Image: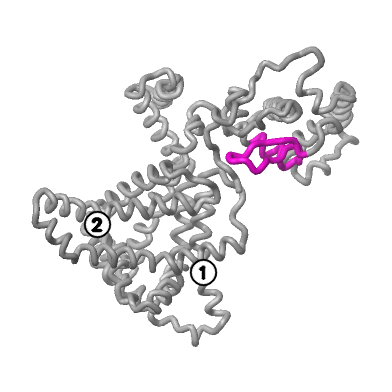
C-alpha cells in the first residue's frame, strides 16, 4: 500500500518543480490552476478561512436585524420598503419553508424597532452593531490580502454607513430601471422577433447569476484596504458566484432531506439550518477573496515549496541583503525597490522578503514612499547607522519581555558566553556603517535594478 505522504510529495514535485514560464500557455494554465487549487486547499486546512467564517456567522446573528433596520429606514423614505422583503426571501430561498418562516421573523423584528423607544444611545448602538459586520468582513479580507492596517475610524464609519444606507437604494433603483426597460414597447417588439426572443430568455436566465457575481466582485474590489485590480475582483467574483449558486442547490437538497433535524431539534432546527447556511456563504465569500488575491499576486503561489518560518541566521542575512539593495539604489539615485522587485532580485520567496521588510520598517530602518506600487527607501541615514546597530534591531525583533529576567549567572555560565559572542560581533563590525554594505571598496554590485515598467503590481498596505 502506497504511503499517502509519498503520494503527496510526488504531487507537490509535479506542480512546483516545473518552471511555468518555460511552458506554452496550453501547458502552463493547468499547472497554474493546480497550484491555485493546492494553495486554496492549504488555506482551508490551515483553518483561518473556517475560523473567520464562524466568527462572521456569530456577528451576522447579532447585526442582521440592525443592518436591515438601518437599510429599511432609508427605503421607507422613498416608499419602497415593501419590496425589501422579497429580496430577503430570495437570499434565504435555499432554506425552503424555513426560509419563508425566518424571513417573516426577521422582518417582524425590523418592524418592531422604534427609534423613539430606543433613544439616542440605543440608535447609536444599533448603527454601531450594523457597521461592525462590515468591519469584520474588511478585517477578514485584509488578512487574505496581507494588509496589516485597517481604515481609520472616521473613514471606516463614513464608508460603511454610506454602503449600508445607499447600497440598498442603488439596488432597487437598478431593479426598477430593468423593470422599466422590460415594459417598453421597443423591448417587447424585439422579444417577438427571433433570435432576440431566445436571447432575451437566455439573459433572463443568466441575470441572477450575473447579479450575484457582480455583488461578490464589488465586495472584493472595494472592501479590502488595498488596491484590487478589476480582473482580480471579477475572477474571485465569478468563482464565488458559481460556488454560491451550486452550494445553494446542494443546500436546498439537504434541507429537503433534513426532516430528522426537525424531529430532533424541534423549533431550534430553523436556527441551526440558518447558521449552517451562513457558514457556507461566508466560507464561499472568503474563498473567492483568496482567489482574487492569488490572481492579482501569482508570486504568492509558492506555498508548496518554501517554509513560512525563517531561521535566525537566514533572517539576519536576508535583512542585511535588503538593506544593501535599498541603500545602493537610494545613494546611486536608481529606481527604488518594490517588495516584488526585492524578492525577484534575491531569488527568494516573497513571503520571506515581506516578513523581513516589515521587520525593518518596524525597526525604523526602512520606510515606504508614496509611489504606486509602494517602494522602499532608508528611514535613517545609512552613513551614521552602524551595521551592528541594525543587527541588534533585527535580533531583538519579537523578543519577549521576560528575556531580560533570564539571569542565572550564579548557577550557570551561560551569560558570560553570550557576552563574549556579543563583544566579538561588536568588535568585528566596529566602524562599519550600513552604507558600507552598498558596495564595499573596489567591489561592483552585479544586481541590476528593475525599471518601473518591469514591476508588476503588488499589495499596497495603506
The residue indicated by pointer 1 is 129
Q: What residue appears at the point 51 percent right and 51 percent down from the top-left corner?
A: 224
Whole-number angstrom distance, CA of label 1 to CA of label 2: 30 Å
The image quarter in which residue 362 lies = top right
Q: Measured from the top left, where is residue 388 in percent x and y?
A: 83, 29
Indicate left or right for 429 with 124 as reference: right
Residue extending furthest bottom?
116
Instruction: Please indicate, yes or no, whether residue 414 appears anywhere in the rendered image.
Output: no
Q: Measured from the top left, where is residue 300 in percent x and y?
A: 51, 33
Q: What residue appears at the point 24 percent right and 57 percent down from the top-left corner?
A: 252
Indicate left or right for 332 with 249 as reference: right
Q: Measured from the top left, where is residue 196 in percent x and y?
A: 14, 51
Q: Measured from the top left, where is residue 168 in percent x and y?
A: 39, 67
Q: How is the image coloured?
A: one colour
- Report the front residue among 289 and 443: 443
- Report the front residue among 239 and 100: 239
The residue indicated by pointer 2 is 252
Instruction: Please indicate, yes or no, whether residue 148 appears anywhere in the rendered image.
Output: yes
Element under disc 1: helix
- Report the front residue among 313 and 192: 192
Answer few, some or many: residues within 10 Å of disc 1's Cα (few below 14, many 20 plus, some between 14 and 19). some
Q: What residue appears at the point 29 percent right and 67 percent down from the top-left corner?
A: 176
The image quarter in which residue 11 lies = top left
Q: Is residue 186 magenta?
A: no
The image quarter in which residue 180 lies = bottom left
Residue 26 image label: none
Q: Is residue 362 magenta?
A: yes
Magenta span of residues: 355-379
Amino acid at each position: 500500500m502506497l504511503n499517502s505522504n509519498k503520494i503527496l510529495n510526488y504531487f507537490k514535485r509535479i506542480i512546483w518543480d516545473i518552471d511555468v514560464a518555460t511552458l506554452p500557455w496550453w501547458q502552463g494554465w493547468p499547472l497554474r490552476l493546480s497550484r491555485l487549487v493546492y494553495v486554496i486547499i492549504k488555506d482551508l486546512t490551515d483553518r483561518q478561512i473556517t475560523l473567520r467564517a464562524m466568527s462572521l456567522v456569530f456577528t451576522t446573528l447579532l447585526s442582521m436585524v440592525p443592518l436591515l433596520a438601518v437599510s429599511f429606514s432609508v427605503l421607507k423614505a422613498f416608499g419602497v420598503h415593501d419590496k425589501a422583503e422579497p429580496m430577503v426571501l430570495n437570499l434565504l430561498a435555499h432554506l425552503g419553508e424555513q426560509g419563508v418562516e425566518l424571513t417573516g421573523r426577521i422582518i417582524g423584528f425590523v418592524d418592531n424597532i422604534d427609534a423613539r423607544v430606543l433613544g439616542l444611545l440605543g440608535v447609536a448602538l444599533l448603527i454601531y452593531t450594523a457597521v461592525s459586520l462590515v468591519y469584520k468582513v474588511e478585517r477578514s479580507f485584509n488578512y487574505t490580502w496581507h494588509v496589516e492596517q485597517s481604515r481609520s475610524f472616521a473613514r471606516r464609519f463614513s464608508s460603511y454607513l454610506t454602503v449600508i444606507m445607499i447600497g440598498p437604494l442603488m439596488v432597487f433603483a437598478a431593479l426598477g430601471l430593468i423593470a422599466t426597460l422590460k415594459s417598453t414597447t421597443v423591448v417587447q417588439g424585439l422579444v417577438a422577433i427571433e433570435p432576440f426572443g431566445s436571447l432575451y430568455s437566455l439573459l433572463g436566465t443568466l441575470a441572477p447569476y450575473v447579479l450575484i457575481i457582480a455583488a461578490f466582485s464589488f465586495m472584493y474590489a472595494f472592501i479590502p484596504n488595498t488596491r484590487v485590480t478589476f480582473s482580480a475582483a471579477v475572477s474571485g467574483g465569478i468563482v464565488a458566484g458559481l460556488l454560491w449558486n451550486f452550494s445553494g442547490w446542494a443546500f436546498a437538497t439537504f434541507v429537503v432531506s433534513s426532516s430528522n433535524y426537525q424531529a430532533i431539534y424541534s423549533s431550534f432546527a430553523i436556527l441551526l439550518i440558518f447558521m449552517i447556511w451562513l457558514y457556507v456563504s461566508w466560507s464561499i465569500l472568503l474563498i473567492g477573496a483568496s482567489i482574487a488575491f492569488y490572481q492579482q499576486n501569482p508570486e504568492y503561489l509558492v506555498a508548496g515549496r518554501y517554509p513560512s518560518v525563517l531561521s535566525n541566521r537566514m533572517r539576519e542575512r536576508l535583512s542585511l541583503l535588503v538593506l544593501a539593495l535599498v541603500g545602493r539604489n537610494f545613494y546611486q539615485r536608481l529606481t527604488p525597490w518594490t517588495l516584488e522587485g526585492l524578492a525577484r532580485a534575491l531569488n527568494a520567496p516573497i513571503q520571506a522578503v515581506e516578513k523581513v521588510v516589515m521587520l525593518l520598517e518596524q525597526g525604523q530602518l526602512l520606510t515606504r514612499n508614496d509611489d504606486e506600487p509602494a517602494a522602499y527607501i532608508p528611514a535613517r541615514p545609512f552613513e551614521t547607522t552602524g551595521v551592528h546597530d541594525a543587527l541588534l534591531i533585527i535580533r531583538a525583533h519579537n523578543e519577549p519581555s521576560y528575556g531580560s529576567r533570564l539571569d542565572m549567572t550564579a548557577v550557570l555560565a551561560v551569560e558570560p558566553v553570550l557576552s563574549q559572542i556579543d563583544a566579538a560581533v561588536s568588535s568585528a563590525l566596529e566602524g562599519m556603517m550600513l552604507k558600507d554594505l552598498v558596495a564595499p571598496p573596489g567591489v561592483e554590485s552585479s544586481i541590476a535594478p528593475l525599471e518601473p515598467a518591469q514591476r508588476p503590481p503588488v499589495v499596497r498596505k495603506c
